[in-house]
Image (cartoon, rainbow, N blue to C red):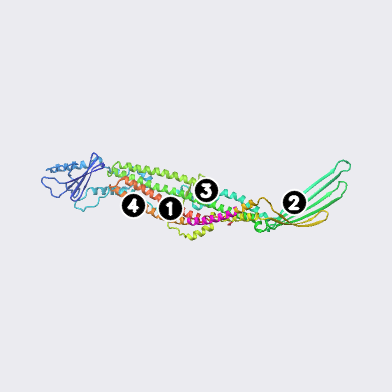
């Protein structure tokens, strides 16, 4: 005889027996007694043995009970067979009371409509019949037959309602998500960003002024025409009979042209028509032409100085285009990350929905076990609490989806009430690592990065400032020529050299020159430093990408381990040896592992996007061209 005690709660006692062993579970005020004894085929005259099951309808006729402290003496064997049968009935009544036996109709779920609403099919009549037969065969086994593993009477039901998991690596966006909203691909998000994003629109508005400034600089060498029309009327009103008046009309035009050498040509033409009075028809026409040419020989001389403003304007135009490219890249990358943020939140909603569905299925299975007396009533509390926790997490995930959607719509610059749904398959595009060569990335970065190219252009502007400061240090020596044709048909030609030198500002010119020269040296040092920073940034990006992909692999392994842990906890709980708290932790661990794996995939894709930003190929990757590129 052996007796063991453990804490628990049972709604009805159970009996387990083997070939020569008998175990009885009896609930006594919150304490469960496990009583074990030895069953023999021969009876002794002083001790009764457990009743041997009959071949046709085997059932136990007696059992040996013990108290928690010491075993009780065995009851005497009844002499009368009827008395013996009555004793067996009383023992069976004690062990299996009729009012505690679950009816046949309670072996199916209480609320089938709820199960149907959750897309779970309840067991049919044939399955219920099989459950009944399996239950009877497990309770009435012939001792002559070899011992088999104890079969769960609700195995068919549990197998029918056991949750299924989809592999995370093969999962894409849920079809129901796209059906309930407007599908939006990543390429669509990029195109909408270029077309409607507010900072990009402002950048293109700035281009209107910038192009006007460039046209002004380019027109510096165009001829400039200045027409003139003048009419003059004078008279003496003393003699009222004869009006002495003088009418004069003058037409003229001035033309100036700046030459690439720094010289300037000016032409001034005047034509004058005069009428003496109203009584006579005397009229006179006179013309005058003036031609002048001024060529600097020292200061402001040469094509380099003359084209300095135009070259600055061209360089500034390149800087403006690079700024536009940078604005486009920044906003496109921001839209891409906002899109992936929405995609991540949608996937987390799906993961939470799967976890909630599994928790509800586990709750239904736990209720079935409680109704069958296989689990304690208190175990339902943790299962219900688990369902409540997942419902709360689902609300938070859905709210995060709405926030991410609004952020994306604001970034795209479209209507805020559009129910857009991200439809990219994150798992599919992160299956294999990207092949990256550091030398190739560095070459592309030095040829395409807007910030680095802007620094190069600023260095060129600094060199222009040095040229201008050096020019301002020189003396002014100009060659001036002039040809004049007067109204009196007389003409004259003159040529002269004019030398000028301002005094008193010598130090200012020297200071401006030194400042410009030092600025060039600083720009050169900053360029060298920026090159090293770009190389370091490229190395960091490539190393980060490799790290992110390795994290994806580890996160996927964590998902698989969490899935196996959940299956093991479910199997233990179905066998009556598990704990609902451990199962709850396993379900939450699986959900966290899935969300972590999703986060790692999003971070890996964002790292690739940041690498494109580092090497300056974002616009080329998305086939976005500027007006100068077309």
Q: Which residues are magenta?
A: 515-536
Q: Dot 1: within a 10 Å radius of its alpha carbon, few (fewer than 14), some, or many (20 or more) residues?
A: many
**Mark 4, residue position:** 564
The CA span between labels 2 and 1 is 71 Å
Q: Position of residue 203 (x, y in %)?
A: 57, 49
The CA span between labels 3 and 4 is 42 Å
> Which of the marked residues, 2 or 3, is nearer the chain's N terminus?
2
32 with respect to 323 (left or right): left
Secondary structure of the residue carrying tag 1 is helix
Q: Nearer the viewer, residue 548 or 23?
A: 548
**How many numbered marks appear?**
4
Q: Which mark is residue 270?
A: none
Secondary structure of the residue carrying tag 3 is helix
Q: Position of residue 578 (x, y in %)?
A: 29, 47
Q: Dot 4: within a 10 Å radius of its alpha carbon, few (fewer than 14), some, or many (20 or more) residues?
A: some
> Which of the marked residues, 2 or 1, is nearer the chain's N terminus?
2
Q: Which mark is residue 227?
A: 2
**Mark 3, residue position:** 412
In this rendering, does residue 105 appear at all?
A: no
The CA span between labels 4 and 1 is 22 Å
Please identify, in this view, whether the residue under mark 1 or under mark 3 is nearer the observer: 1
Secondary structure of the residue carrying tag 4 is helix
**Mark 1, residue position:** 601
């Amino acid at each position: 005889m052996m007796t063991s005690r453990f804490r628990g709660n049972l709604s009805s006692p159970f009996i387990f027996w083997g070939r020569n062993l008998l175990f009885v579970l009896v609930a006594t005020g919150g304490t469960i007694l496990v009583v074990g004894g030895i069953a023999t085929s021969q009876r002794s005259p002083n001790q009764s043995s457990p009743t041997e099951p009959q071949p046709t309808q085997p059932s136990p006729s007696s059992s040996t009970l013990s108290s928690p402290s010491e075993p009780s003496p065995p009851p005497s064997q009844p002499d009368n067979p009827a008395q013996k049968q009555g004793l067996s009935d009383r023992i069976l009544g004690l062990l299996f009371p009729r009012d505690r036996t679950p009816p046949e109709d309670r072996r199916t779920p209480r609320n089938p409509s709820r199960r149907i609403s959750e897309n779970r099919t309840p067991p049919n009549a044939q399955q219920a019949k099989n459950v009944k037969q399996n239950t009877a065969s497990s309770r009435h086994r012939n001792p002559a037959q070899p011992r088999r593993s104890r079969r769960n009477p609700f195995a068919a039901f549990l197998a029918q309602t056991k949750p299924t998991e989809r592999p995370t690596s093969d999962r894409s966006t849920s079809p129901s998500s796209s059906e309930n909203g407007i599908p939006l691909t990543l390429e669509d998000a990029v195109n909408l960003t270029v077309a409607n994003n507010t900072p990009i629109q402002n950048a293109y508005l700035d281009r209107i002024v910038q192009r006007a400034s460039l046209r002004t600089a380019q027109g510096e060498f165009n001829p400039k025409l200045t027409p003139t029309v003048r009419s003059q009327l004078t008279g003496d009103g003393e003699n009222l009979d004869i009006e002495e008046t003088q009418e004069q009309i003058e037409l003229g035009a001035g033309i100036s042209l700046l030459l690439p050498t720094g010289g300037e040509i000016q032409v001034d033409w005047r034509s004058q028509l005069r009428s003496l009075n109203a009584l006579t028809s005397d009229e006179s026409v006179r013309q005058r032409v003036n031609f002048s040419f001024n060529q600097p020989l020292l200061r402001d001389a040469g094509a380099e100085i003359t084209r300095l403003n135009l070259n600055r304007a061209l360089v500034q135009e390149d800087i403006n285009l690079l700024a536009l490219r940078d604005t486009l890249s920044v906003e496109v990358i921001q839209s891409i990350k906002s899109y992936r943020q929405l995609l991540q939140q949608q996937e987390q909603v799906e993961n939470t929905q799967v976890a909630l569905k599994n928790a509800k299925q586990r709750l239904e299975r736990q209720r079935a076990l409680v109704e069958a007396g296989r689990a304690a009533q208190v175990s339902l509390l943790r299962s219900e609490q688990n369902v409540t926790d997942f419902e709360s997490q689902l609300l938070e995930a859905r709210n995060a989806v709405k926030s991410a959607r609004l952020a994306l719509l604001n970034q795209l610059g479209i209507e805020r009430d559009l129910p857009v749904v991200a439809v990219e398959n994150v798992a599919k595009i992160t299956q294999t690592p990207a092949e990256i060569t550091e030398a190739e990335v560095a070459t592309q970065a030095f040829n395409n990065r807007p910030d680095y190219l802007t620094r190069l252009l600023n260095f060129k502007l600094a060199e222009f400032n040095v040229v201008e400061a050096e020019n301002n240090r020189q003396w002014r020596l100009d060659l001036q020529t002039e040809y004049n044709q007067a109204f009196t048909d007389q003409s004259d030609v003159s040529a002269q050299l004019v030398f000028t030198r301002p005094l008193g500002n010598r130090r200012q010119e020297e200071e401006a020159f030194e400042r410009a020269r030092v600025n060039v040296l600083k720009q050169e040092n900053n360029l060298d430093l920026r090159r090293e920073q770009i190389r370091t940034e490229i190395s960091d990006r490539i190393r980060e990408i490799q790290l992110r992909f390795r994290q994806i692999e580890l996160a996927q392994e964590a998902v698989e381990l969490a899935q196996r842990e959940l299956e093991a906890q479910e199997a233990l709980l179905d066998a009556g040896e598990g704990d609902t708290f451990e199962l709850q932790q396993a379900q939450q661990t699986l959900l966290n592992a899935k969300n972590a794996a999703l986060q790692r995939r999003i971070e890996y894709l964002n790292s690739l996007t940041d690498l494109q930003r580092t090497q300056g190929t974002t616009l080329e990757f998305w086939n976005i061209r500027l007006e100068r590129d077309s």
